[in-house]
Amino acid sequence: MHLSTPSPAGRPAPRTNLLRWPVLRRLARAPRGRLLLQIPLLLWALLVLYDGFTGPQVAPENIATVSVWLHYRGIVVLVLLLFGNLFCMACPFALPRSLAHRLSLRGWRWPRRLRNKWVAIGAFALLLLLYEWLDLWASPWLTAWVTVAYFVAAFALEALFEESAFCKYVCPLGSFNFLSSTISPMQITVQDSDICRTCPGKECVNGSAAVPGCGTLLFPPQLTSNMDCVFCLDCARACPYENVALVPRSPLAELSDPGAWPLRWDLGLLALVFAFAALSNAFGMAPPFYDLLERLGAMPIGLRLVLIFGALNLLLPAATGLGVAALSRAISGSRELLRHNFGRYAPTALPLAFAIWLAHYGFHFATGALALIPVMHAFLQDHGLALAGRPDWTMSAILPFSWLLPLQVIATLLGLAGSLYALDRRAGRTAAPPSRTALLPWAILWLLLAFAAIAIFSLPMEMRGTRFMD
Ligand code: SF4
Ligand code: SF4
């Protein structure tokens, strides 16, 4: 791949570069540095498969269901909030790409028409639908099969295509992590953009004989976003000048910058789907959802779920987003393309959307984190380890139940404040800033989403993956 002079030109050198810290520097330079993180997750995935297929088929007693639906989701949102996309960095599903590179397999390019987020939007909505339809959270066996499907899909796409097509264009977990990491406090950039300007090989993206370049085809000197960055540090390994930097940043810096993302329909819609799905996923565990299912009682269950989640996760975000963008453009009297309004402001949903996911997954983690102790206790005893005592199946919560709703409300309100701030900053930093009134439709939409989230959190929630669900 050949790239022109990096931009933005003359970007000031970052004051803090975490890749200059001795331990991280060694990790970033070590040829198998990423493997150190992938192996523990690979072992965990194998344990999920083993216990999912052979262990007790009772969700709160199986490593597959408890660790995937309680721990993975709870920990991943906390890590995204505090550090960044470390799960993608350690993702065991990405191992096939490394294998293909070692075997010198050169795949095809991913079809040009699919180099966008439309497939990712469909895959994300499909996974959420299957989660409800198949009650994945309640079935160790199906959870194990989903893990197998992930390995097969990742291997097939990574082996067939040159770039990391699965991560960038398909993976629903990757989409979740990419979107969430846009408010993470760390980002890849370069130490000195002048070095990049005269760099002949651009190894960070092109790779070298020994090290692959960026699998998702990002070019560090031009990065303005964490979107599509799997934090693999291949760019840092490949750069002959040690010029790649990992820098701290304000969590709202990216979403406050109107130039951080291209103004595209698919990217804006992905952000809105992520926001509406945060609500629908929580709604799917509350009593009004079951009332709605009953009211549609004449139809098969699959069709009812397709109708409900198709409407909530795809139709509603698309229709609302388009309507709000049209209204905002009309109020401002601007002649800009509708796509520009949509693409510029829809991503400002992300702080609120992430806060709703955090509040939801944090709820399950807080009510069930200790459940893994008796599960592991029983697993080890079943496999011949003479541990003293019997598993204490009452172990579960790490926070008092009465704290949870206030914490969820606080998280949602902070997310709302972040979205409103990003909206205002994005508008203020465009070439022709619109009037504040033009932002009202978007601000009202974020307010309504936050209100809906708090209303849903105030309902009694189904306790999934813990013994409370029995
Ligand atoms: S390989 Fe290094 S110096 Fe060259 S363009 Fe990439 S980051 Fe810059
Ligand atoms: S820019 Fe590319 S190579 Fe560098 S950490 Fe991100 S995904 Fe990996």
Image (spheres, grey):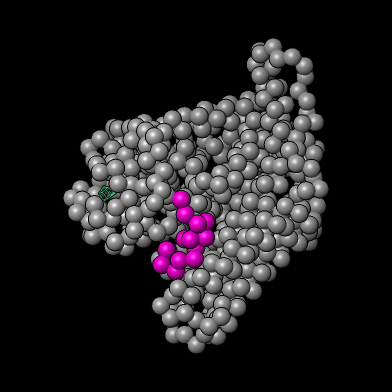
**Residue 16's x, y, as percent?**
41, 48
The answer, for residue 395, to whether it is visible in the render is yes
**Residue 236's x, y, as percent?**
33, 42
Q: Is residue 250 shown above or below 395?
A: below
Name the residue furthest bottom: 333
Left or right position of 43 against 237: right
**Residue 242's x, y, as percent?**
29, 42
Q: Is residue 80 shown above or below 211?
A: below
Task: Point out the stretch of residues depicted in magenta.
Answer: 248-260
Residue at 76%, 62% in the rendered image = 455
**Residue 287's x, y, as percent?**
79, 55
Left or right position of 87 against 101: right
Q: Quadrant of residue 57?
A: top right
Residue at 43%, 30% in the rendered image = 36
Residue at 41%, 43% in the rendered image = 18
Taking the magenta stretch, the answer to whether it contains residue 251 is yes
Q: Is residue 19 shown above or below 112?
A: above
Q: Is residue 427 shown above or below 24?
A: below
The answer, for residue 175, to whether it is visible in the render is no
265 vs 210, nearest the viewer: 210
Taking the magenta stretch, the answer to whether it contains residue 114 is no
